[in-house]
Amino acid sequence: MINRRSFLQGSGAVAGLSAMGLSGCARRVVAPVAPTVTAAPALPFYDAVGPIIPIRADMDRIFRITVCTRPFRPAGPRQDVERVGDKFVVHNYGHGGSGWSLSWGSADVVVRKVLAEGSAQREVAVIGAGALGLTAALTAQRAGLKVTIYARERAPYVRSVRATGSWTPDSRIALASAAAPDFPVQWEAMARTSFAMYMSYIGAAGTPVEWTDRYSLSDGEHRVYPGEGRDYVEYMDLIADLTPGFHELPPGTTPFPTKSVRRTTSLTFNVADYARQLMTDFLIAGGTIETREFHTPQELTTLPQRTIIDCTGYAARQLWSDESIVPVRGQISWLIPQDGVTYGLNYKGLSLLARRDGIVLQLNKAGEDDGWNDSTEVPDRATAEEAVGVLQELYGRMAKMRQMGQAAKLERKQDADI
């Protein structure tokens, strides 16, 4: 297994932009790039690398740029309970970059606390309609509760839909120096519960969740990021049995030009369809949703429900005056989706994931600390184009390597003819 931080370190620094005209960037149907034929150790037949279709990395194919503010808490998610007037409030926010990944497990934790409260009242209010709110509402319904969601916004406007859409259950979830001693055990339980629920969506109509291959590309460089002074927890070893680890691929078995190519397979959340399905399931089960915004905890006392699950995400910083929440800005550039492009890769600080609702690119210039304590949500076009430029540079190297391979093959043929 490789953890997220090592994955970013191995990607190295951001390279300069390249304006090469590549066949992979041309505005026409592009054939898969065949691996260069070289004398290299062969992979088992069953584990061979499939076609890597180049992404059309044209600047004018950026169809949108979105920014998400991730709510990071050094101690980890807030899941305690408190009384506000006669209301019983269970908190469920502060999941950093792990909101979608841990949502079902976190919902299980807070709904159990609602049931343990022992009230005869079977009606529950959920505040927020993002990843945490929808999964908490559905989990409460499945426990036999009647649920009403109160939210200022709903998909496609909530912050959750601007997430990368990858299985990252320990991404900026806590600091080792601030988390409680039993938090690793709690985290593992949430991760396993979430993963089990996601397996029920595999193969569902619309492909809300699917397995896709990921490639980590490196030339052997190692960059030390400023944020490495923060002791982010690394828990993936606790659930190493759930997903495949990274495997080094022999040189010549892929079209990638880097010294090191590692491959794994992980979960992809096609958020547009997945969020829609969650909302549909909630409404079909008899749930209701009302548009409403809360500015102070006292406003919650006006709700008819006695029990409240608070899933307000970054908005909790203002609502509950929770200064422990640190905003972490994340910007995504969206390229038009392409048939056959289903992989993800990490290269020189660029994280790319091809989803069915778009090919998302995120440029991390500071590792885990990229966007730290930055709550601005104004898109940066220059950074979006820089991300696409890194992808163009990679494809330029791939094209050059392919040409060299073809030249070497021709030379060997000529030598054989002589």
Image (cartoon, grey):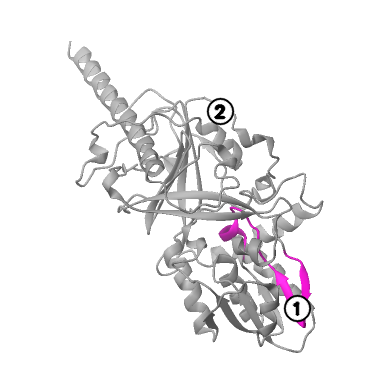
Quadrant (top left/top right/bottom left/bottom right) for the N terminus: top right
User: Callout 1: 10 Å neighbours few (<14), some, many (20+)?
Assistant: many
Residue range in magenta is 79-103
Q: Is residue 277 left or right of residue 91?
A: left
Q: Which mark is residue 67?
A: none
Q: Can you tell which of label 1 and label 2 is closer to the viewer? A: 1
Q: Which residue is mark 2?
A: 223
For residue 46, what is the image quadrant? top left
In the picture shown, does residue 226 fall above or below 39? below
Q: Residue at x 55, y 65 (%)?
A: 131
Q: Decide whether residue 83 is among the magenta residues.
A: yes
Q: Is residue 155 left or right of residue 358?
A: right
Look at label 2 and name its amino acid.
Arg
User: Callout 2: 10 Å neighbours few (<14), some, many (20+)?
Assistant: some
For residue 303, what is the image quadrant? bottom right
Q: Residue at x 48, y 68 (%)?
A: 275
Residue 85 percent coordinates (x, y): 77, 80
- Asked if residue 111 shows in the view, the reply is yes
Q: Which residue is mark 1?
A: 88
In the picture shown, does residue 162 fall above or below 223? below
Q: Residue at x 61, y 74 (%)?
A: 294
Q: Alpha carbon of mark 1 to alpha carbon of mark 2: how far?
A: 48 Å
Quadrant (top left/top right/bottom left/bottom right) for the C terminus: top left
Comparing 269 with 73, the one in front is: 73
